[in-house]
Image: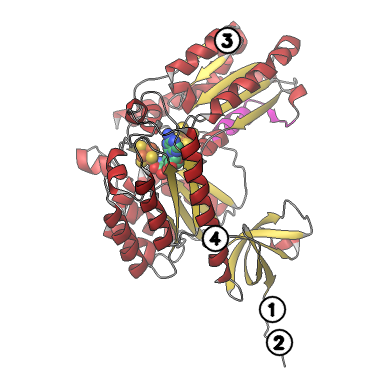
Amino acid sequence: MENKSKTRKEIEKQKEYIKKVKEINKDKNQKYSILTMGCQLNENDSEKICGMLEEMGYTKTESQNEVDLAIFNTCCVRENAEDKLFGKLGELKRLKEQKGTIIAIGGCMMQEKHITDKIKQSYPYTDIIFGTHTLHKLPEDLYKALKEKKRQEDILDIDGKIYEDLPIKRDSNIKASVTIMNGCNNFCSYCIVPYVRGRERSREPKAIIEEVREIAKQGYKEVTLLGQNVNSYLRVEREKGIEFEQYEGVNSFATLLRAINKIEGIERIRFVSPHPKDFTDDVIEAIADCDKVCKLVHLPLQSGNTKVLKEMNRKYTKEQYLNLVEKMKEKISNLTLSTDIIVGFPEETDEEFEDTLDVVEKVKFEQVYMFIYSRRVGTPGDRMENQIPEEIKHKRFDKLKALVESQIKENNQKYLGTIQKVLVEGTSKNNEHMLTGRTDSNKVVIFEGDKSLIGNMVELEIVSEHMWYLKGETVPTVSKER
Ligand code: SAH
Ligand code: SF4
Ligand code: F3S
């Protein structure tokens, strides 16, 4: 309770800074740009950053020449993001000299000391560095950077608290993301996330339900619940006896799904990213029972080999994973599955990799996100001796990719001739005369239709498949007379 009033006071303080910056920006037509580099949680953080900035009088621009404030929201889960960030920072130097553009870098990468050291040394013209636990303090950091004209470094090493009631500017007006918990306690041995996002902590049920009610009221049809370990929502609180207020009977992930399923206006509920170990029976039953919960479930496999899984600290074996899949298929009708797989974890042999292919063959995933293992400083995986040569990693990746693509092709066939409910998201990127939407199983469907359908759920007959998308036709509401 004491914590809650502290965080509320902190946000009130930040709202004062929002007003102060707005005053400084008055009549100045200030423009900002934002580059979001990470996962859906990172994107949701960016929506909060944009919400704060717009309240401070900034408007978004895509054209680099007119940027007064450049924001980077970074990710460090794999290595390629680093070069991208440094490249962009290099590009901005001239703009900084010409027009005094403020440069602010936040997100997961800023929780890594070797990165912030490098920024301070090689890109000393960076104005603000903020971490994952201090995002809400951007107004204060910005105010100080503008007033004091010296670098603000605002990073916390300890676990952040939960701050409610930040302004938010959402990317879409059809689908909304709602972060329900932060942090991760799993420490998979390849992964940097637990180090940069801290320990698991869940938002209060009431705050989440009120946020979902509010987005439903604004006309959103789909909500995605987010967390690094989303289905362990409130687990730590329950296990450690940390106080939380029950609301609408919510005291777990399963009960949260049930409560959100009742909110009028919301038609689809998705969630990412869950961990297989937290698919307890109550969660499986809630997915089966709740009509709005999409039957596409993400079930990160990472590897299909029991020894590699043990080295990865994933807490399940190949057999346990396959049994879980069977159980879920039995209990949830129309279940489809997607997954994440890493190839080339240290010590992985060709034979062990074959187990991954075997699981992929058996489960027949709807979608597979494939990653080449990337060493992350500070993780146990990075300290393991037998790192796999790049060449072998790439060979395995290609082999997995070929299998996955052949399965997708085959799987697409099953859609042909079926009627699918599709949430229409907008016009197709490649053809503005076509509309695009997604099925319950998250497949992209494009079809000809009137723009007034955008934002609605329509029924489409699937007429052809094109690997990464399907083509559909609207089904007449009145049956044709013969
Ligand atoms: N919390 C989520 C997301 C973690 S990051 C989860 O547990 O699923 C998303 C994916 O990136 C992971 O599932 C994993 O497949 C991949 N990943 C994480 N660390 C990685 C690394 N060091 N190298 C390659 N892929 C990695
Ligand atoms: Fe990383 Fe594992 Fe946590 Fe996912 S569950 S964020 S892969 S440590
Ligand atoms: Fe990246 Fe941080 Fe998400 S490391 S994957 S942005 S939690």
Q: Position of residue 275 (x, y in %)?
A: 35, 47
For the point 33% across and 27% down, the residue is 385
Which residue is tagged 1?
A: 476
Q: Residue at x 38, y 67 (%)?
A: 332
Q: Earlier in the sequence, mark 1 or mark 3?
A: 3
Q: Secondary structure at mark 2?
A: loop
Query: Which residue is tagged 2?
Result: 480
Decide: marks 1, 2 in contact (CB < 8 A)? Answer: yes
Q: Is residue 403 above or below residue 1?
A: below
Q: Looking at the image, which residue sits at the far bottom?
A: 482
- Kind of residue indicated by mark 4: Ser
Label 4 to label 1: alpha-carbon separation: 33 Å
Query: Which percent across, then down, holds residue 87?
Result: 64, 21
From the top left corner, tell me how far across and down residue 146 is, in percent. Answer: 62, 12
Q: Are marks 1 and 3 in contact (CB under 8 Å)?
A: no
Q: Which mark is residue 122?
A: 3
Magenta residues?
A: 48-62
Identity of the amino acid at label 1?
Answer: Pro
